[in-house]
Image (cartoon, rainbow, N blue to C red):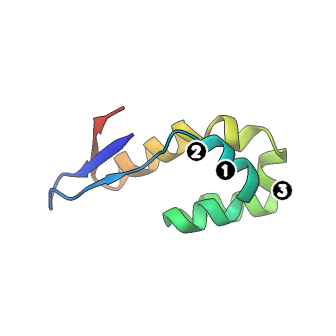
Amino acid sequence: MIVEHSGSGETQVALGPLHWLWCFLFGFLYYLGKGMWVLAILSLLTINGLFVVMPLLNRMLVRDYYVRAGFRIVQE
């Protein structure tokens, strides 16, 4: 998924093809790397969403984070 910031026009890749695997393997470090502090703490406290929930919902969680931060989705 590629997103673009509505104010600055900056584009970046939000999700790669194996995003769920990275989320499953690295858990809270994955979210820290993306700057999602709340999800990182939640992932750490729930042991990565009990190993199943957060990796399965990762696409939705990351998409919502970027939309709320002022980005628009360029390519799904």
Q: Is residue 34 left or right of residue 69?
A: right
Q: Position of residue 48 (x, y in %)?
A: 77, 53
Q: Nearer the viewer, mark 3 or mark 2?
A: 2
Q: Is residue 28 above or below residue 65?
A: below
What is the quadrant of the N terminus in the image? top left
Q: Which is nearer the N-term, disc 3 or disc 2?
A: 2
Whether residues under marks 3 and 2 lie with C-beta atoms below 8 angstroms apart, the answer is: no
User: Local crowd at mark 2 within 10 Å, few (<14), some, or many (≥20)?
Assistant: some
Q: Which mark is residue 23?
A: 1
Vertical arrangement, residue 33 with respect to residue 11, above or below = below
Q: Mark 3: which amino acid?
A: Ile
Residue 14 image point, x, y percent: 42, 49
Residue pictured at 33% horizontal, 43% vertical: 2
Residue depicted at 58% across the width and 44% down the height: 19
Is mark 1 in CB contact (under 8 Å) with mark 2? Answer: yes
In the image, 28 versus 70, the foreground residue is 28
Disc 2 designates what residue? 19
In the rendered image, which quarter contains the C terminus? Answer: top left
Q: In this view of the protein, which residue sits in the foreground, 25 or 47? A: 25
Residue 41 higher or lower than 61, as above or below: below
Determine whether label 3 and label 1 are within 8 Å by CB: no
Amino acid type for the residue under numbered disc 2: His
Q: Earlier in the sequence, mark 3 or mark 1?
A: 1
Disc 3 to disc 2, how far (Cα)? 18 Å
In the image, what residue occupies the spot 30% across and 34% down? 75
Residue denoted by label 3? 47
Q: In front: mark 3 or mark 1?
A: 1
